[in-house]
Amino acid sequence: MSNMLLWGGSRVFSHLFGLGTNEWRIISALGNHPGSSASELCEVLGINKSIASKAITVLTERRLITAKDGRWNSRLLFLTPAGAEMHTRMMPVAMERQRLLHRRLDPEEIRVLNQALLKMLDAKDDLMLYESEVLAAPPLADD
């Protein structure tokens, strides 16, 4: 499901706007959290720094976002007027994709789905701890 959503969204956004899903996610996040640092965006979006960095570079080159100096040498990111316009243009496409995804669910099923997804997000720290423990251990030997 995740791959289907990311691949399909990326193809649609690229075709319509010349941007991929990662760029859309950064634009959307900055629409909701203007003045976020790249690290904060990674945390909010659950993406790694290299993905965020590539998307931020594309958006900066297209003059859709701008960076301003913040405290402690951080760079705070904001949508430019062109970025805000792009957000406005992209949002209906994202909302239509969501509507189509939800259309076979009744309101109670959507509520339960959202509740389950939030609980899964709450397990993120447990998953990250497990992954760091596995990566700290020696690899399993080939049999």
Image: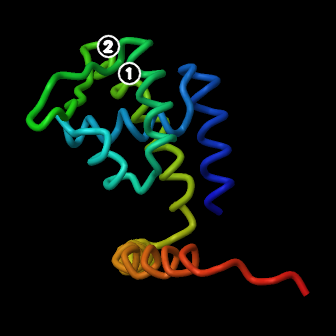
Question: Which residue is nearer to you in this view: 60 or 132?
Answer: 132
Residue under the point 49% across and 82% down: 130
Image position of 30 with respect to 124: above or below: above
Identity of the amino acid at label 1?
Met
**In this image, 99 relative to 70: left or right?**
right
Identity of the amino acid at label 2?
Ala
Q: The residue tagged with tag 2: helix, strand or loop?
A: helix
Q: The residue tagged with tag 1: helix, strand or loop?
A: helix
What is the crowding at mark 2: few (fewer than 14 residues within 10 Å), some, or many (at least 20)? few
Q: Which residue is mark 1?
A: 86
Q: Position of residue 101 (x, y in %)?
A: 56, 58
Residue under the point 42% across and 74% down: 117
Image position of 102 with respect to 25: above or below: below
Q: How is the image coloured?
A: rainbow
**In this image, 120 relative to 74: left or right?**
right
Residue under the point 49% across and 43% down: 96
Q: Which residue is mark 2?
A: 82
**Quarter of the image where one finds residue 63:** top left
